[in-house]
Amino acid sequence: MTQMKAKYLKDYLPPAYTITHIDLDFNLAGEQTRVIAKSQLVRKDSAQTRLVLDGDQMKVLSVKLNGEAIDYVQDETSLSIEADFSEFELEIVTQLDPEANSSLEGLYMSDGAYCTQCEAEGFRRITYFLDRPDVLAIYTVRVEADKNAFPYLLSNGNLIEQGTLENGRHFVQWQDPFPKPAYLFALVAGDFDLLEDEFITRSQRPVKLQVFVDKGNLHKSHHAMASLKKSMAWDESRFDLEYDLDIYMIVAVDFFNMGAMENKGLNVFNTKYVLADTSSATDDDYHGIESVVGHEYFHNWTGNRVTCRDWFQLSLKEGLTVFRDQEFSSDLGSRAVNRIHAIKVIKNQQFAEDSGPMAHPIRPESVIEMNNFYTVTVYNKGAEVIRMMHTLLGEARFQAGMKLYFERHDGQAVTCDDFTTAMQDASGVDLSQFTLWYSQSGTPVVSVAESFDEVKGEYKLVIEQQTPVTVDQTTKAAMHIPFDLELISADGDSMLSEVLDVKSSHQEFVFSDLAHKPTPSLLQNFSAPVKLHFDYSVEQLVHLMRFASSEVARWEASVALISQSIWDNVANLAAKKAMHLDLRVSDAYRGVILSDSLDASLVAEVLTLPSVSALIEQVNSVDLDALVLARDFVIGELASTCEDELLTRYCEQAEVDEAGARALKNACLLLLQKVSDQHQQHAQSQYENALNMTDSLGALQALNGEESSLRESLMTDYEKRWLETPLVMDKWLTLQATSGSETCLERLEKLTEHSSFSFSNPNRVRSLVGAFAAANLVQFHRLDGKGYGFLTETIIKLNKLNPQVAARLITPLIQFKKFDLDRQKLMKASLEQILALPELSKDLYEKVSKALD
Ligand code: B3K
Ligand code: ZN
């Protein structure tokens, strides 16, 4: 029986022994793969005589202490020995079967190549070890394998020796001079195409850059390489950080549980975040690659050089590194559009996590399965917390804080408190109340009321904050919230712009000498991850859409305006009144469509109307059927009223070869489909004349809302064209999974047998089943329960095959509280079915048991 016990942050103890050096010797030979691990241990706690190593039921061939075979005790999760020495050498030989490892954790095979994934606790599937991030060792790794099948043998650090052996085998030896925790270890063995380049650091050191991809894909590796070079240059110029080894390798593999992994000097990537050419990848794919390549590169300092003391501190490296990759993308591209995307992740996904059964602070306090905590809270809210510090300190003091953090902690495994202390010490800014963002879970609700005294010319804002109770914490304190505000005059001029320090549950701010009542642009740029309650009138929102200085604030006003219109119509339906759309709303949108001062990519963001799931996140409970009707109505009305303008803008943009223009063109095309079938012709010609994947996919997405013979024939054409290119077929699987057709689900069931689909590949599962459950709300929440059934069957299949992916898929099912009782009942029945599984994984157990609690 797998252990389902939680671990607690409060129970942290430093390790009783540490490992300073490890020599690993891998003999890669299929199911007979052997690993010799020779470790140098030092006892830290002299009262300890028993050494307990972490490990996951591996076959142990021998254990030797200082060269002598010794007795050991092995159980489900550990191997222990008597070790009453202050320093000693331990040699453990394990035997592994990488081909049988479908969990894609530890050493496994991806399409004929050996590769590893050790974060968070995968190293314990390779050998018995002190598998915790505060044990940092120097690694030497020897890899031996068949030379023909595995010409490249890679590991961390610098290559120190290689040679040919008998029987067609060869070996390579690597050494990583930087001490590292086991989760950063990596090994790859395979046959690849290789793209090489060089980066000269600002201190004139040459670094060899290598990108390894599956044979035949070399032409798709250039964007990843260019992104890597940009990342290296950006980290030098913005963060004053230089790369430290002589070589940096990226390997792209097909079978991977997440996006990529920052192993020291040897990043392993999901092919999705490496391979791109214009015919097969969209502009969004290009952007995703640049940002993930950057993210993993930035970890070299924030994560690798300074790592986490324990896994509860995960946000120390992830929140900070997401912040850094967001800044990288914003410095290189559109700051406003990047910010909008980050805000959407928080509002549409992170707020849902806070209000569901998995609510946790960015520094969790208890964990059953660590892999369940690579969450939008730890990553994205974590990045918002860093961003708030950046707002409070300003760039110069923030960078001074970073510098002090590295001066103090380079080469160490530290805590989130160590980070905030460095920030505070370097800047002189008091962060004592601010640190609550690390320990308190939940989304603060900030309610604002305004009043204007015409006689005195005084404008007053009353700001109240309160954090609703979450499943994990019953008492909540007031937070330190940086609240960015702009006051805008009736003529549209900016009268004031400042960041207010909101620190208590009730505060009043008075602004004097104002000739008339201003329009407030509140919580600009989403200056804190909170829910804002303010009773904006339609006039105020329209004013903000036109005049707010911040482009992000203009976009936020548009979302508020359209959302309000949709909710008003939900209320109309409930009251059995006719639905309608206020002309002022469509006028405001028309203004945006016609605007030539706004960037095309920003207009595209405004025209990308909130999804059903985004709307659900705005309320505590929802009548899903009414919401879908009201949303369709509002979008249909808006599109019809602006039809001419949409068509003009569509045609104009068709001439421009830029990502922003393509995004706008596709947003217009999608809205035009809501007006009449006549606009199908534009989608058809766009598809037929497309010179890039953004245009092809945009056309298919526009047609995906309803069944039509055109959609059918274009989908068939696409399938034929791309059948042999898995990443491109993933887009097709997602189109099928998110189609508006009534028979969508029946089709999906058949598609699980399609040659392009496989339950063992996480990208395929996410594209079909993940996309269905997360983005096709109408079909997923069918009242006959078949949508839930489809997801449940998949989760049951993956429970043993790949528990990490199974547990990721379950998110939409555990967030059942917002739905009506009939649906809740069905969703809970699915969860009960999963909970009753024999040999339920820890990953699923943790989520399902919390959901049903
Ligand atoms: N650090 C890895 C994620 C590991 C996830 C383990 N389940 C990728 C990243 O955040 O850069
Ligand atoms: Zn990361």
Image (cartoon, grey):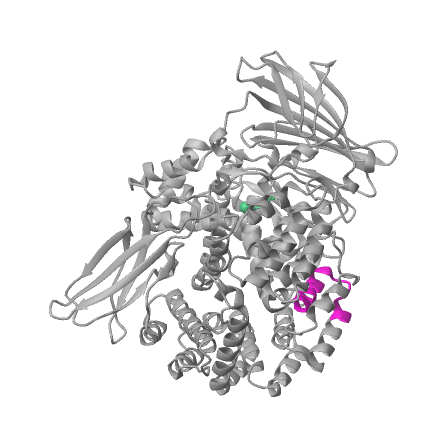
Residue 194 sits inside the magenta stretch: no
x, y percent for residue 761: 72, 53
Residue at 76 percent of width and 56 percent of height: 758
x, y percent for residue 641: 47, 86
Residue 734 sits inside the magenta stretch: yes
In the displayed structure image, the side of residue 115 where residue 336 appears, left or right: left
**Quarter-wise, where is residue 752 in the image?**
bottom right
Residue at 82 percent of width and 33 percent of height: 32
How many numbered marks, from 0 up?
A: 0
Predominant secondary structure, magenta span: helix
* Residue farthest to the right, as pictured: 167
x, y percent for residue 318: 51, 45
Residue 289 visible in this rendered orientation of the protein: no
Read off the magenta span: 719-737
In the displayed structure image, the side of residue 70 where residue 32 appears, left or right: right
Residue at 36 percent of width and 65 percent of height: 550
* Residue farthest to the left, as pictured: 455
Residue 713 position (above or below residue 475): below
In the displayed structure image, the side of residue 453 where residue 337 appears, left or right: right
**Quarter-wise, where is residue 373 in the image?**
top right
Residue 425 position (above or below residue 575): above
Q: Out of 595 and 453, give the one closest to the viewer.
A: 453
Residue 205 position (above or below residue 796): above
Residue 801 visible in this rendered orientation of the protein: yes
Q: Quarter holding the N terminus?
A: top right
Q: Out of 73 and 386, give the one closest to the viewer.
A: 73
Q: Out of 195 and 818, give the one closest to the viewer.
A: 818
x, y percent for residue 231: 52, 50
Q: Out of 432 and 654, give the one closest to the viewer.
A: 432
